Image (cartoon, helix red, strand yellow):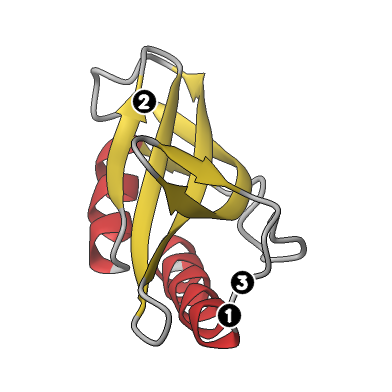
Amino acid sequence: MIFENTGLVGLQSDLLYLDESAEKAGFIRWQWEYYRATYDCKIEDRQNGGEYYLRVNTRAVEGKLEKPDAILAIEAIYLGKATFPHGLEYESPVPQSVLAIAGERILELKQLLEA
């Protein structure tokens, strides 16, 4: 599931501030390479026992990721259900409770980045 109209796509931040803001909003920088990084927020569906990951994709527009002053731009925000052993499935329906938490996390990250 891709989230549209979040206000996050296109926002830019230096790596250090993005890492700090993402952590405050419940995300961790999970996958990264020299020019892109992915921030994930785990959301548990306590009613049905599923795990979902809210994912924020970023790309360096200035510098490389090993430097805290590299500038990253947010490219996409999406949500997937964790599958065994190591994957995310993006097509199945998402419970409303998970969507509500995802919306809160998106808003919190946006507010931190715009501060």
Residue at 46% x, 80% y is 101
Left or right of 77, for residue 24: left
Measured Cα–Cα span from mark 3 to mark 1: 4 Å
Residue at 68% x, 69% y is 93
Measured Cα–Cα span from mark 3 to mark 2: 34 Å
Relative to 14, residue 20 above or below: below
Q: Residues within 10 Å of mark 2 (few under 14, many from 20)?
A: some
N-term-proximal mark, 2 vs 1: 2
- Counting from the top left corner in percent of width and height, residue 100 is at 54, 85
Q: Which residue is mark 3?
A: 94
Amino acid type, mark 2: Ala
N-term-proximal mark, 3 vs 2: 2
Residue 86 occupies which quadrant of the picture? top left
Q: Dividing the image into 4 quarters, which one contains the N terminus?
A: bottom right
**Who is closer to the viewer here, 59 or 79?**
79
**Who is closer to the viewer here, 10 or 45?**
45
Relative to 54, residue 69 above or below: above
Relative to 106, residue 58 above or below: above
Q: Dividing the image into 4 quarters, which one contains the C terminus?
A: bottom left
Amino acid type, mark 3: Val
Q: Which residue is mark 2?
A: 70
**Who is closer to the viewer here, 35 or 85?**
85
Q: Residues within 10 Å of mark 1 (few under 14, many from 20)?
A: few
